Image (cartoon, rainbow, N blue to C red):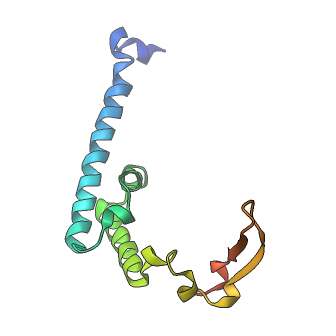
Amino acid sequence: RRHMSRIPWDAKGAIPAITSQVNSMLVTEGVAVVMEALQQRFPDLPLEDYFTNAFVASVVDLVQSHGNPLEYYIEKLSEAAEWRQREDVGSILERPFERLPPEAMFWQGIDYQRQQVLYVRPGVVNM
């Protein structure tokens, strides 16, 4: 209680607000830095489709909580982008039959529109 009395009464509510604004600015700047670094590494990839700003902001927020440098997370996101490009992840839903073997899929039952339901079990496939 004594340490709180040293803070002026009108400033008590302002300190958390200022801290939140500074953290928000750091995260916003960090998102820009990460996206620019990824864009330099992968100029032909649609990175906005791979990583939303909210996702990159959550990654940048890990820098403060986990203590790893920003370059560490840029490297991890680069590995994810390389994997997505190599495996052509963006088109898997467009052509599931080409990517998954028959034992990973089966038809069973009907839905409310009286259409057959296709069950896909990608966990049984070692991709």
Q: Is residue 107 left or right of residue 14?
A: right
For image coordinates 59% across by 86% down, the residue present is 100
Q: Is residue 127 visible?
A: no
Q: Residue 3: where, in percent of width, then height?
A: 42, 18
Q: Residue 56: where, in percent of width, then height?
A: 37, 56
Between 83 and 115, the one lying in front of the other is 115
Q: Which residue sits furthest right?
A: 109
Between 114 and 18, the one lying in front of the other is 114
Q: Is residue 3 visible?
A: yes
Q: Residue 42: where, in percent of width, then height?
A: 25, 74
For image coordinates 72% across by 71% down, the residue present is 117
Q: In the image, is residue 16 above or below residue 31?
A: above
Q: In the image, is residue 5 above or below residue 50?
A: above
Q: Is residue 109 left or right of residue 51?
A: right
Q: In the image, is residue 51 above or below residue 79?
A: above
Q: Residue 120: where, in percent of width, then height?
A: 66, 77
Q: Quadrant of the C terminus?
A: bottom right
Q: Is residue 2 left or right of residue 20?
A: right
Q: In the image, is residue 7 above or below residue 77?
A: above
Q: Which residue sits furthest top?
A: 9
For image coordinates 62% across by 90% down, the residue present is 101
For image coordinates 35% across by 26% down, the residue present is 17
Q: How many marks?
A: 0
Rendered image quadrant of residue 62:
bottom left
